[in-house]
Amino acid sequence: MQAWITPPTRTEIIEGLVSGVDRYNPSNVGILEDYLYHQIRSEEYDCLANLAILKLYQFNPELYNPDVVVNILIKALTASPLPDFNLCISLLDERPINATLDEPDPLPGLLPILNGLHDLLNRCRFPAFWEVYRSEQLENLRDNYTVECVGFEDSIREVVIRAVKTTFTRIGADRLGSYLDLSGPQLEAYVKKLGWTFDASRSVISVPPNPDNQIEATVVQESIKLPQLTKVISQAAKG
């Protein structure tokens, strides 16, 4: 949680803009936008800094940049199942629809698509996510946005792995491959990189034990004093 609030990659300058009163200064929006594109190029992520951009757009409609908003939402997709995407969407309710733009606003067309992708991730429908993401209908999203987001597909795979780790102790290779959109040597290399065990003879992958995928018996002890028990018996007798 602390890493979400203050990512270790955040610089002192950005920390001052995010945590101080300067976060509402419209003259700083360019610095925050540059920081977003640094995140896009470097596989870093800072939700609070990106939310600060959206808040500045709310207060200053003339600053609105739809490409920036789309990139913020794309980065937020990779944070599932954290609520980052919904937090971003909540700041778009007052999106300036009459902003002066040199080109048509791409956000109205892309927003339902991004919402749909987020819904599939949130419901752990990973094969469906990849099918939709790779479809011809999303060619514009891939060619103009996610291609610029370094490591986007691997970040989505990390979302998958977080879900698998909390659910499975063993999983079939074909099933995991459909979740990750990987097969053959690529899948084997990915599993090896995770440090998981791949039993090729049975085509089964073992997921290391962790607090979420282990069932442990819990003993609950309750202390009831005699006077309390007497009251309960007395009330039952009256009933």
Image: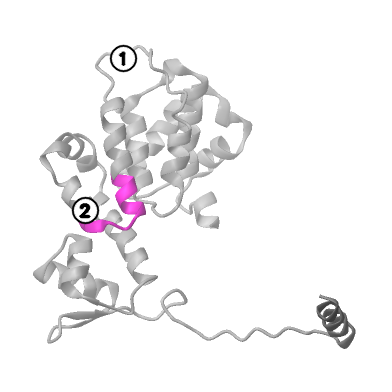
Task: Report the magenta residues as a range.
Answer: 117-127
Locate the C terminus and report the quarter of the image it occupies: bottom right
Q: Amino acid at mark 1?
A: Leu
Residue under numbered circle 1: 101
Give the foreground label among 1 and 2. 2
The x, y position of residue 217, in whole percent, is 53, 86
Q: Amino acid at mark 2?
A: Ala
Query: Which label sits on residue 164?
Result: none
The x, y position of residue 61, in whole percent, is 45, 17
Q: Residues within 10 Å of mark 2 (few under 14, many from 20)?
A: some
Q: Secondary structure at mark 2?
A: helix
Q: Is residue 80 above or below residue 197?
A: above
Residue 98 occupies which quadrant of the picture? top left
Q: Residues within 10 Å of mark 1 (few under 14, many from 20)?
A: few
Q: Is residue 46 above or below residue 183?
A: above
Residue in the picture at 55% in, 24% down: 25
Residue under numbered circle 2: 128
The first of marks 1 and 2 along the sequence is 1
Q: CA distance from mark 1 to mark 2?
A: 34 Å
The x, y position of residue 86, in whole percent, is 44, 42
On the question of residue 52 being in view, the answer is yes
**Residues marked 1 and 2 touching at CB (< 8 Å):** no
Q: Secondary structure at mark 1?
A: loop
Residue in the picture at 53% in, 57% down: 1
The rendered magenta stretch, by its main secondary structure, is classed as helix
Residue 21 occupies which quadrant of the picture? top right
Between 116 and 189, the one nearer to me in the picture = 116
Between 53 and 208, the one nearer to me in the picture = 208
Whether the magenta-drawn stretch holds residue 85 is answered as: no
Residue in the picture at 29% in, 42% down: 116
